[in-house]
Image (cartoon, helix red, strand yellow):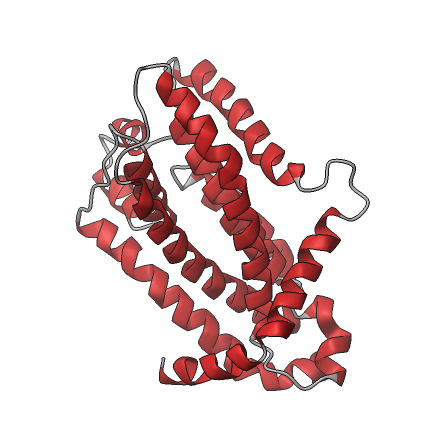
Amino acid sequence: MVRVMKLLPTIWNRRELLWNLAVRELKQRYRGSVLGFLWTLLTPLFMAVIYLFFLRLLAGRGVPMEEIIIGVFAWQFTVQCTQAGTTCVLGSANLVKKVAFPLEILPLSQVLANTISYLLSLVVQFPLLMFLLSRSNQHLAMTWPIFFLWVAWQTLFNLGLTSFVGALNVFYRDTQHLVGLALSAWFFLSPVMYNMEFALNLAAQWPLAADLLYANPMTVILNGYRAALLPESAAAYPPAAWIGLLLVPVMFILGVVVYRRRQHLFADML
């Protein structure tokens, strides 16, 4: 952790490079696309509508649409950071080989670009939530500013994941394929398309399953978002949830440490 803190002044001195890489990522993502940035908004919206339909069809009762909206947008934030992490070093091979700069900027620039996209998506997410709540004469909870503290917490988690998979994929190219499979499984093990009430009802006979769900860092983050924005939602913190909460800084430290210890070999492996 001390080494990470010492790195901050170096990154600050290279902040212009960090910003340029983040902007390049955003431009490349939408280059040649007719709808451009709108895909950042449309993808999670389409996912929410599709899964909402199937949840109601299969379960016979619906999870509130506003909870699904929050879950899908937040999930996409982590997915995009993690997927970008697999190529953050490989995609900048020429830069790594020819230019001397703190290589930690590579995963950081990916997370920065996706954080900007996520924050811009709030321009659609918040009005949509307010519209859905207004149908039942409700409005956003007075605690809505806490939402941005959870954004910072998720960003920390995403940076750890991005750094970790970015370093691994340099040495083990199968990592990017394993990440795709892991994200698919993780999606169903996280309360993205359902809330904790729905999950606990299903897991009533398996208390261990409920504990494992609460120990998932994404469960804690999603519950925090919903509790901050929705007036009738509250984040529960049983003992297992504190494990999920603590796994966020653990993942951050692990990702940064693995990345820093292996980065001196990146140029030779590319």
* Residue 34 in the image, given as x and y percentages of width and height: 78, 36
The residue shown at (30%, 31%) is 230
Q: Is residue 270 visible?
A: no
* Residue 114 in the image, given as x and y percentages of width and height: 57, 53
* Residue 44 in the image, given as x and y percentages of width and height: 55, 35
In the displayed structure image, the side of residue 268 where residue 144 appears, left or right:
left
Q: Quadrant of the N terminus?
A: bottom left
Check the image and report above or below for 134 versus 265. Answer: above
Depth check: give the residue in front, 189 or 125: 125
Q: Is residue 86 visible?
A: yes
Check the image and report above or below for 102 versus 200. Answer: below
Depth check: give the residue in front, 168 or 28: 28
Depth check: give the residue in front, 257 or 149: 149
Q: Quadrant of the C terminus?
A: bottom right
The residue shown at (48%, 36%) is 72
In the displayed structure image, the side of residue 163 where residue 90 appears, left or right:
right
The residue shown at (55%, 81%) is 13
Check the image and report above or below for 77 versus 3. Answer: above
* Residue 223 in the image, given as x and y percentages of width and height: 31, 41
Quadrant position of residue 257: bottom left
